[in-house]
Image: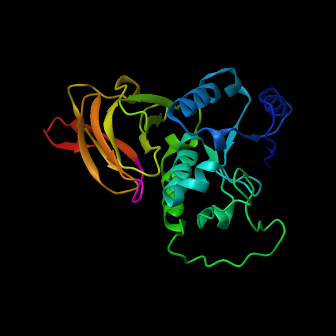
Amino acid sequence: MLFLAEAFTRPHVMYRLAKLGFSQSYTYFTWRNTKQELTDYFTELTQGEVREYFRPNLWPNTPDILSEFLQVGGRPAFMIRLILAATLGASYGIYGPAFELCENTPVQAGSEEYLNSEKYELKHRDLNSAWSLKDIISRINRVRKENAALQSNHNLRFHGTDNPMLLCYSKTTDDLSNVIVVIVNLDSFHRQTGWVNLDLAALGLKADREFQVHDLLGEGRYLWQGSRNYVELTPESLPAHILRVRRWIRTERDFDYYL
């Protein structure tokens, strides 16, 4: 049985609830949108003292909260927040059909409450809508299940980018048998390009060896070498890469393959 502290309150209250035995807790992820905000907050959660007792559960929306980012960013904004929630934390959730169908109309300007909320009325929805995110949600959940690196919080590490709209981070298993690098375009309106600067040692990679990255979302495969590599992400299609790193191996028989 898991106990979720469903409370958005002051940090010390949230941390106290965690110490009292709540298995997981809501976080301020919903309102952390910029590269600096996300980096600072998740460094605190995964590398600071609170990581010993606070188990974050990331929600892009709730029945009570429709953030401004989702209100104005359209379908790409929902994809961006979904990918961030599913890969930054070991546990995440979404407020069901409202999120899946990208519902983003508030009661009024400046409000974070849904218009015609199903807290107060029955809702009938077309779950086969062209706006539905069901396919990408299924794909991301499958990626999480198949990659142990995404099932932990303590292994999160941020990497540099030369574009403030590109966020890059990695997760690894302790033995580096599973290495995932995620790069997200935080801009829901424009294509963003730039260079990522990977900490190769943290990923078990060598600067003089090429390595393959397999995009588990778009299914592309790329050969990279060294710490600096180029990326280009368009929010309307897929605003992120979830890259499985495969290292180049040479056997005694000179048979080359990627692990």
Q: Main secondary structure of the magenta part?
A: loop
Q: Quadrant of the C terminus?
A: top left
Q: Is residue 99 left or right of residue 139?
A: right
- Can you tell which quarter of the image residue 24 is in? top right
Q: Indicate the position of residue 90 as horizontal and vertical percent values.
A: 60, 43
Q: Does the image show residue 154? A: no
The image's colour scheme reads rainbow
Q: Is residue 238 left or right of residue 30?
A: left
Q: Indicate the position of residue 146 as horizontal and vertical percent values.
A: 48, 52
Q: Which residue occupies the extreme right position in the image?
A: 20
- Can you tell which quarter of the image residue 100 is in? bottom right
Q: Nearer the viewer, residue 180 or 187?
A: 187
Asked if residue 125 lies in the magenta stretch, the reply is no
Measured along the vertical axis of the image, is residue 116 above or below residue 55? below
Residue at x 25%, y 25% (from the top left corner): 207
Q: Indicate the position of residue 132 as horizontal and vertical percent values.
A: 54, 69
Q: Is residue 104 left or right of residue 216?
A: right
Q: Nearer the viewer, residue 111 or 150?
A: 111
Q: Does the image show residue 1? A: yes
- Can you tell which quarter of the image residue 205 is in? top left
Q: Which residue occupies the extreme left position in the image?
A: 254
Q: Which residue occupies the extreme front position in the image?
A: 109
Measured along the vertical axis of the image, is residue 245 above or below residue 160? below
The magenta span reads: 235-241
Measured along the vertical axis of the image, is residue 112 above or below residue 126? above
Residue at x 54%, y 61% (from the top left corner): 137
Q: Indicate the position of residue 214 as horizontal and vertical percent values.
A: 33, 49
Q: Is residue 110 left or right of residue 16?
A: left
| Number of numbered markers | 0
